[in-house]
Amino acid sequence: MATKTKPAPDGKRQRLSPEDRERQIVDGAIQFFAEVGSGGQTRELAQRLGITQPLLYRYFPAKQDLIERVYEEVFIGRWKGEWEDLISDRTKPLRERLIAFYEDYARDTLTYEWIRIYMFAGLAGEDINRRYIQLLEKGLLIPVCTEVRDAAGAPSPTDVAISSLEIEAAWNIHAAIFYYFVRKYIYQTPVEPDLAAYIADTVDRTLDGALAITRETIAAEQQRVVA
């Protein structure tokens, strides 16, 4: 969690380089929006940082500019391209790949700031959530569906398009991990202390169901063709 920036002891504004000042504002904004949502006023943010509002606007002329920078830092900046390679690496069992992905994703992405900003943005109708969901569908959900197809011996998406129900099945795995952190950071209720064990258990319960349903669907389709 980012730390609050306090004014200098003598009450004067700290002299920072432009790069350090911008970093101070962005880090402060991440914590601020995580606490109060994007509806928080830039005047209050400036006060917390110990700077003037005009100085803040010198770096970010409009509040939306600052929100966009926070989105880039917290959401886009934490997404790793190698995760997509990990999901599609068929030299390892799919279960192993999903567990490795979610352990890394949970550690690097699903932080206090990420979860709270994401939830606040959704309630405020911000575009952040829709854009991130598009990223998830392209970079995670569709690849997971593709790998479930392969593990179940089903036709590839190039032969038969992935259905909306398959996408929902991939969401079930993701949503279970996501909701663990919602309970932890939003509701502040007890969660399983062994996160690695929780992730493995969740993947086992949801992946097994997805594979079973996919195999049943294949068998039903084959019977229909024969009949």
Image: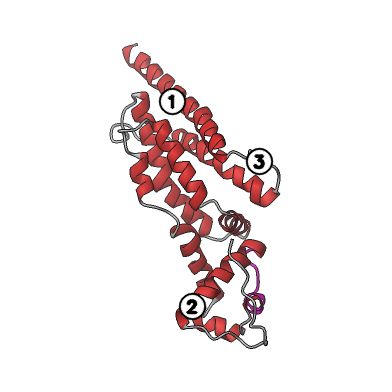
Residue for badge 2: 20
Query: Tags 1 and 3 in contact by the CB under 8 Å rule?
Result: no
**Residue identified by numbered label 1:** 211
Image location (x, y in percent) of residue 47: 66, 79
Mark 3, residue position: 191
Q: Quadrant of residue 1?
A: bottom right
Left/right of residue 114 with respect to residue 131 in the rendered view: right
Of labels 1 and 2, earlier in sequence is 2
Pointer 3 with pointer 2, Cβ within 8 A: no
Q: Residue furthest top?
A: 227
Task: Specify the amino acid type for callout 3.
Answer: Val
The amino acid type, in three-letter code, at marker 2 is Asp
Q: Quadrant of the C terminus?
A: top left
> Neighbour class for label 1 at 10 Å: few (<14), some, many (≥20)?
many
Magenta region, residue range: 37-47
Q: CA distance from mark 1 to mark 2?
A: 50 Å
